[in-house]
Amino acid sequence: MDASLLFRIAACKEAYFFYQLGERANELQRQAPMVPQQIRNQVFAWFSAGDLHPLSFTRITNKQFSVQLDRLTTSVDGLVLSKLIYASASSQAIIKELALSVWLLKKRGYYIAKVEVYVINKEYIREGELDYKKLFNIEDYTKTVIGKSYRIDEIVPLLVKNGSISMNTTLCRWLDTNCQYAHKCFAHIPPYSVLNIAHLAKESKHDLLSSGIVETQDVPREFLSDYQLIQIECDRTKRRHIDKLALAQFLQKIVYPIYFLDFEAINYAVPMFDRTRALSPLVFQYSLHILNSQKSRLKHDEFLAPSDADPRRAIAERLCGAIGENGTVVAFGATFERTVIRELAELFPDLRAKLQSIVAKTVDLMIPFEKRWFYHPKMHGSCSLKSVAPAIDSKAAYDGAIKNGIGAMERYLGLLGETDETAIASRKELLSYCEKDTLYMVSIFRALTRAAR
């Protein structure tokens, strides 16, 4: 049993029965830290250096419990338990895991005097060789972890009770759809339900489900804002909502030639290149579809950087060459694209003027959907590109080998260890995935133009 399940049992009836029935959860896939294996090995060598307790980096068990220890060292006050994570802050899951570690060590007669977590310092900027002491901050979690470890003695008796907790598959009291047991608690709820109403508070969702209201069109109007009523009315009528005046005013900002731009970036937990910051997005790829006029043929430009070199200068130069002085740059959720280009402008003074002009003429294609000037019932409450594109274009689908941004990051990271043949295939998949985003943006723009007439 893992620590997360152990603590859920104290508050979640379904988790108790999940354990009692001996079933296994289909855990949500967590985003792995973006750290090349070679760098990971170097960090581990630094972290594990020195005189360590024999239990360091081993798994300890006690009947149904099992946990992997990180570093154990000895101090004058007792043992120091240390854990290293590739994140800028610890999580409840990490704290629970450490609490279980402390509890199991206590059962073996060991006293833990201090618990500390090594977290990534987001302010660290690499200059030359990695400075591990600056890369990591050390946070003291002794009081929190030891306090939570005492709770385990209260929780353990729940594991031996037989049938004292009644089965409840109605809903999780936190409506925590990210829980790894949510597929059990929410099994009776369809994929699209009141849980998908945009910007509806968890408490309201709880009240609706508790009263037996599951379908969006059954929600009383007093629960909803005018914004949410658009979604519900579209669900009821199965028709689109269009604010033609607002759409027309928005589209006036977009003039030809139009450059549909999308970036892919990777969040290296450990900065790979000079003048890069830990856990800061590093753009490695772009797709650019170009429409010179309403009737012109669509052109495409793309770039995918090698995975073993700093990609920023090459991308900045390519963008400056591909995007002309006139026209509009269109991105979906353009805050990210603007931020990336601004950072490139600060990094390369000789390209600054051109890059700043690109930022100045960038328009966010998400706005009409975010503002509900255009809403389609197939969007299911979301205004993300992956919800909007299939709703507008029946041919739009992310059904390739790479289906989302995390998949793209993982594939790009994997290029470092792939053979030439495999790397060629991976690069083709990355280019295909990024190209879809800008191609679908063209379809969306054309659909909005028709809708505004």
Image: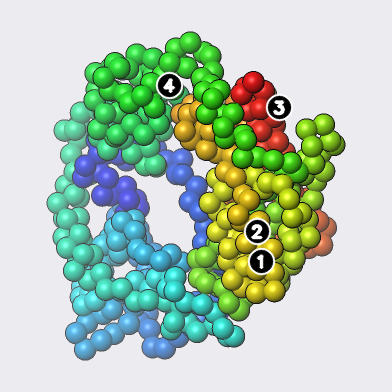
Residue bearing mark 1: 353
Labels 2 & 3 near each other (Cβ < 8 A): no
Would you place residue 355 above or below residue 80 in this image? above
- How far is the residue under mark 2 from the one under mark 3? 34 Å
Residue bearing mark 4: 230
Q: Is the residue marked by circle 4 packed among few (<14), some (14-19), or many (20+) residues within 10 Å?
A: many
Q: Which mark is residue 357?
A: 2
Q: What amino acid is labelled 1 in the image?
A: Ala
User: In which quadrant is the C terminus drawn?
Assistant: top right
Q: What amino acid is labelled 2 in the image?
A: Ser
The residue mark sitting in front, 4 or 2, is 2
The coloring applied to the image is rainbow
- Viewer-side residue, 260 vs 182: 260
Labels 4 & 1 near each other (Cβ < 8 A): no
Labels 4 & 3 near each other (Cβ < 8 A): no
- Viewer-side residue, 133 vs 126: 126
Residue bearing mark 3: 395
Labels 3 & 1 near each other (Cβ < 8 A): no
Q: Is the residue marked by circle 2 packed among few (<14), some (14-19), or many (20+) residues within 10 Å?
A: some
- How far is the residue under mark 2 from the one under mark 1? 6 Å
Q: Is residue 197 left or right of residue 251?
A: left
Residue lying at 19% horizontally and 33% vertically, measured from the top left? 165
- Mark 2 vs 3, N-terminal side: 2
The residue mark sitting in front, 4 or 1, is 1
- Mark 3 vs 1, N-terminal side: 1
Question: Looking at the picture, how far across and down is residue 213, in whole percent?
Answer: 31, 17
